[in-house]
Image: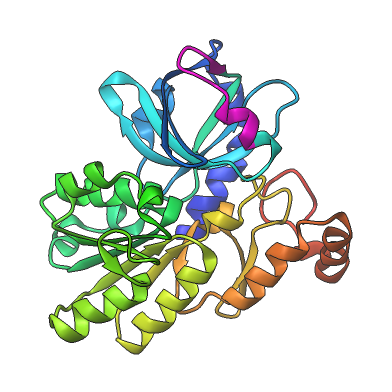
Amino acid sequence: MKTDTARKNVVGFSEQIGRMEESMYKILKSEVLANNIYLFDVEAPRIAKSCLPGQFVIVKMDEKGERIPLTICDYVRDQGTITIVFQTVGASTMRMAELKAGDSFQDVTGPLGVPSELTTDPLEEVREKKFLFVAGGVGTAPVYPQVKWLHEHGVEADVIVGAKTKDLVILEEQMRSVAGNLYITTDDGSYGRSGMVTDTIKYLVEELGKKYDVCVAIGPMIMMKFTALLTKSLNIPTIVSLNPIMVDGTGMCGACRVTVGEEVKFACVDGPEFDGALVNFDEAMKRQQMYKTEEGRAVLRLQEGPTHHGGCGHCNA
């Protein structure tokens, strides 16, 4: 059912482009959250009307601009706005960081991807579960809308937010307003607890005796890998979001091809959320490094053949 929904989303990609508003997508707010991390509020009424936590948009600055997939961090339906958060990692995002309030994107396409399961599961079942969210770095942005959605529906969740240093902790005030309990941890101990997010998970479960039915971990691939390994040993089912490996966002580039269990999946069309215990993180991270070079992409296309792309409707895969 989840995969079918994803395929329908991507098959409808061209239709969504055709329905785009004629006007540009104005940036109403531009804020620097931390070093190289930025927040934009963008005017996008159609997307704001229908999006759900876990989904993403593809933004394009101008006619020749690169398509950049970004998770929807927040939305205000009656104001027709969405919030996106991004980190500068290359030329396109560096250009995007120069945009200010009053500037516009040429295109914002979405909502894309499959919504978080907690938003589509029966509400009475969701309310019976104890949730733990683990956010690493910019992963705090996609965690926030899920925690906010739960809060709005009467479910309080524990949240761990991890960052390398105090200066890289983002959205703390917003997260504190919707989390049942918020635990901040920094690698260098400059703020909150000291150590990795996995240390805090152990503290909550082993020392405080907390019990969780679901863990949602979003952040760097290496963080999600070790979080999933730990929670598996603690018998806590864990969902991870593979948005860090998305490049094109439509299934055409093959960048986010990943093995989940024994199946080949694509983060942008089948996810971005998957069972963390089934994701082959080592394979995905190695593949992510290969994809950064033209030679690496050529090798992947040769090795993977017709399975290199995923369900985009624009190729013969």
What's the magenta region?
93-104
Query: Does 280 appear in magenta?
Result: no
The answer to whether 184 appears left or right of 317 in the picture is left
- Residue 305 locus on image (x, y percent): 84, 65
> Residue at coordinates 45% horizontally, 16% vertically from top-left?
101
> Eyeballing the image, is 258 above or below 250?
below
The quadrant of the rendering that contains the N terminus is bottom left
- Residue 11 locus on image (x, y percent): 61, 42
> Eyeballing the image, is 222 above or below 81?
below
> Residue at coordinates 29% horizontally, 51% vertically from top-left?
146
> Residue at coordinates 13% horizontally, 56% vertically from top-left?
155
Q: Quadrant of residue 136?
A: bottom left
- Colour scheme in use: rainbow
Q: Nearer the viewer, residue 13 or 67?
A: 67
> Eyeballing the image, is 133 above or below 105?
below
Q: Examine the rendering and report whether any part of residue 142 can be seen.
A: no
Q: Nearer the viewer, residue 112 or 189?
A: 189
Query: Does 95 appear in magenta?
Result: yes
The quadrant of the rendering that contains the C terminus is bottom right
